[in-house]
Each structure stands twice: as C-alpha cells, then as structure tokens.
Image (tube, helix red, strand yellow):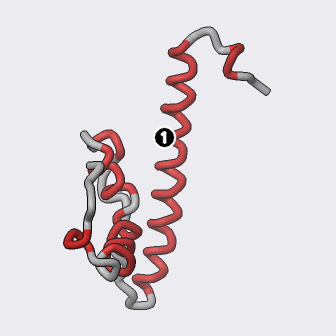
Amino acid sequence: FFLWEEWENPLGVALVGFWTLQFMFFKFLCMWRFFRTFALFDNIVAPDNMTRCMHNSKTFTEFWRAWHASFNKWTIRYIYMPLGGKKTQAYSIW
C-alpha cells in the first residue's frame, strides 16, 4: 500500500494516473460495445457512447460529451430542459 507522501517522483504519479484513465476508458468501451451489440440484436438502437478517444478532447466539455454521450443526452433531455434550460440560468461557470 502506497502513501502519496512516499512518492518522490511526480512523473510516477502522473503515469499511474494516465494508465488508470487508459484502463477505465478501455473497460467502459468494451462493456458499452458488448451491451450495445446485444441491444442491436433485439432491434433496440442505443445512442453511441464514447464516440472518440479521450485524448482527442481539448476541453473538459468535449471530454464529457464524448465520454458519456448517452448520459449527457439523458441529463439534458430529462433534467436540464424540464428545469428551464438556459432560460432560467442565473450564472454560468463554463
């Protein structure tokens, strides 16, 4: 078990973070493709998720829209728009 204080090399911490993200991307991509394939066998067209690799995103917004494309669409359609959407926005952080 490693403590962050024991890591003297910042490159090591960065590499662990990088490879953790790589593993997560591959794991979610495989799971999504597997279940989407079975949905297509039942003539259910699920929205395509993770449309591009996470390295192609230049901003956090692009990353979020590509990483969780179907979740983003659901959030906008069923939470953001019924709550008023951009019409009732008091302030913007993006």
Q: Percent position (x, y) of residue 73?
A: 33, 72
Picture mark count: 1
Identify the residue position indicated by label 1 in the image.
22
Q: Percent position (x, y) of residue 25?
A: 47, 49
| Residue at 50 percent of width and 69 percent of height | 34
* Residue farthest along the left direction in this orientation: 87
- Give the quarter of the figure containing the N terminus: top right
* Residue farthest along the bottom direction in this orientation: 43
Query: Is 1 placed above or below 55 here?
Result: above
| Residue at 54 percent of width and 43 percent of height | 23
* Residue farthest along the top direction in this orientation: 8
Q: Percent position (x, y) of residue 41?
A: 43, 85
| Residue at 36 percent of width and 66 percent of height | 72
The residue lying toward the viewer, choosing from 35 and 16, is 16
**Three-letter residue code for mark 1:** Gln
Decide if residue 7 is on the left or right side of residue 62.
Answer: right
Decide if residue 39 is on the left or right side of residue 72.
Answer: right
Residue 54 quadrant: top left
Q: Percent position (x, y) of residue 16?
A: 57, 28
The residue lying toward the viewer, choosing from 27 and 8, is 8
Q: Residues within 10 Å of mark 1 (few under 14, many from 20)?
A: some
Looking at the rendered structure, the secondary structure element under dot 1 is helix
The residue lying toward the viewer, choosing from 11 and 52, is 11
Query: Is 90 placed above or below 47 here?
Result: above
* Residue farthest along the front direction in this orientation: 90
| Residue at 44 percent of width and 74 percent of height | 36
